[in-house]
Amino acid sequence: MSSAARTTPEAVLEHISTPLAVITKLFEDQGIQDGSDYRPQEFSRLVRDHFQGAFADAETFKRIPVFSQPGAPKSGSLVRFRCMVQDPGYGEELHLSLARAVNTETGEVQQRFSQYTDAEHSLAEGWEVDYSSTGNVFTEKEVAYCVSVPGLSPWAQLEAVASLESAMDALSISAGSAEAGKPSGAVEVAEHKYPLRGERHSAALVKFYSPSTAPKVSTVIDVVGIYELGHNSRTQDADEEKAAWPCIHAIYHVGLSSGGLVPGARVPACGEYAGLRDMCQAHLASVLGGDDLAAQYLLLHLLSRTVRVQDAKVGKFSLNLIGIPAQDKAPTEPARFAFSSPASRWIGDAIAQLVPRSVEIPFDLKLLNRAAFVPSAEQGDLQAGVLQLPADTEVICDETCLHEGTLDEGGVRNLHALQTAILSQSIAYIYPFQHIEMQANLRVLVLSVGKSILQNDCDLHLSKDAAQFLARLQAGGAADLRPLDPMHTEQLRQYLEAARSLDFTIPKDVSDGISGEYASMRRNAHEQGGQLMTQEDLALAVTVARLVSISKGEAELTLASWQEACALEQRRKERAASAKRAQPASSSPPPL
């Protein structure tokens, strides 16, 4: 099919509404006479290349229906699904993709092709599959359980355009149409396999055909494939009616980094970073009631990313903003992964406008005690945990809703898991007889009244004006904030992703200069009877300096950025000392 033909409305409709027919035609065009001539891997590449070419144009690609539940398109149609691989260990399946069929009356022999589906070969009366034939070919499929990306911001969702009228006629997006194409048994969605349990989401078994393999756990991918209601081999029981599971037979998939979720992502020119930094900092300051220092530290936090340098992890920067007003009483609504505090929601919403993924964890005792924060496969099936999140996810913890009560054993384990994620950037996956530490890359922001019950890389007290501003919001007051226009919002998203992705180094002369300053500061403090700068203080100052450089688009640490970081740290410590002198005893965290 020529490139011009692929872009016609009729061809687009055919590929979307009857993709299996398109694939069958591709097979027939190969002129394969016998199963021994069939190369499944080569044919899968051919199908992949054909469909990628058919939807190479961005606007045409957007016409592929987005898979969601409820309201999935009818079985057999083409869909796309932006998802996280929750469980890649569903094993492999074999399917008779090329079968030798024999007419029992005439002896006539035919080849029947059936791939990218779980359906059995449909044969007319008098025909049956010769299962003993050496011409039969079995296709290998690797199966993964995939879910909606947890915390994905609305603006980072798959973009869709108005479908062709003919495509809308051919495809059904109502729940009723799903029922119409549904085999016996109920459509299943495993609630325990979504990290934010109880939250609305979509899920499907995604089947990858060799040579493609299921991506690693917690990877974010865009899948284009054929939707149908199939079966889950793990739940198959000969004594029970088979349950129907949403399945997507992947034609191709693309792995997505955090930057890949930002529409129109572009790398700012070197001269643009300073202006974008100032714009972002000014916006965050307005969100925080004019607190410029808090805005600078929040910007550094949003730019942080954990990277491995030899055997060490550097760049992580969990931040605790202190001085957020407390909720007057414990929430009466069921515990959910959403903020009930107006002040916390205000900050969370502002951050969600800038980052592709953000997850809210209110420290409601019911949620802490009942939720599972770490994934577990002790029962043979990987049950999701709250912290099973893709890399670069923003995790916002709200301690302002923490009230007196009992934190049970499960709650203690959950807080311990969260603390481990903050300090070591790792999540323990629980398997029978062992725990496997998986690397994480989560940015954790803690909002609290007093100092957090969690240990963080950096604690920052809000200014008096910022605290009063948020208190007015908490009391139901309106915020006088001029929103960013769409163009500036998009620029800031691109700026954050581009700066965060910079390959950063620390030149030896700068490293030597910092070491000399550190020794000098300790010597002066000792002579003057002041507090000595510790190794932890030095590590934090270097991290701040690293992020200051990144915020300016610098790929190398400079002494100027180091000095700027030292000045920021001095202001932060002075504010902490002032807050400590003025802090009443009652503002300490509530007892657990």
Image (cartoon, rainbow, N blue to C red):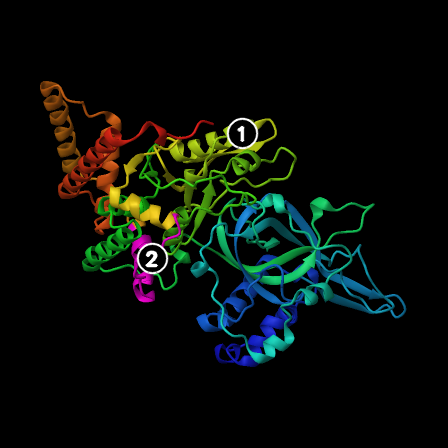
Of residue 357 and residue 240, the one placed in the foreground of this image is: 357
Quarter location, residue 492:
bottom left
Per the rendering, the mark at residue 409 is none
Quarter location, residue 34:
bottom right
| Residue 232 vertical position relative to residue 565 in the rendered view, above or below | below
- Image spot of residue 565 (x, y percent): 19, 40
Quarter location, residue 181:
bottom right
Is 310 on the left-hand or right-hand side of 203? Answer: left
* Residue in view at x 29 percent, y 63 percent: 488
CB-based contact (under 8 Å), mark 2 and mark 1: no
- Image spot of residue 549 (x, y percent): 21, 46
Q: Which residue is mark 2?
A: 493
Is 66 on the left-hand or right-hand side of 392? Answer: right
Work out which residue is located at the far right of the displayed protein and give it: 105
Discs 2/1, front: 2
Specify the segment rendered in magenta: 475-499
Total number of numbered discs in the rendering:
2
**First of labels 2, 1 by sequence position:** 1
The reply to whether the magenta stretch includes residue 479 is yes
Q: Secondary structure at mark 1?
A: strand
Residue 475 appearing in the image: yes
- Image spot of residue 475 (x, y percent): 39, 48
Q: Secondary structure at mark 2?
A: helix
Task: Tell me the CA gap for discs 2 and 1.
Answer: 37 Å
Identify the image quadrant of the N terminus. bottom right
- Image spot of residue 246 (x, y percent): 65, 56
Badge 1: few (under 14), some or many (20 or more) residues near its Cα, within 10 Å? Answer: few
Q: Which residue is mark 1?
A: 435
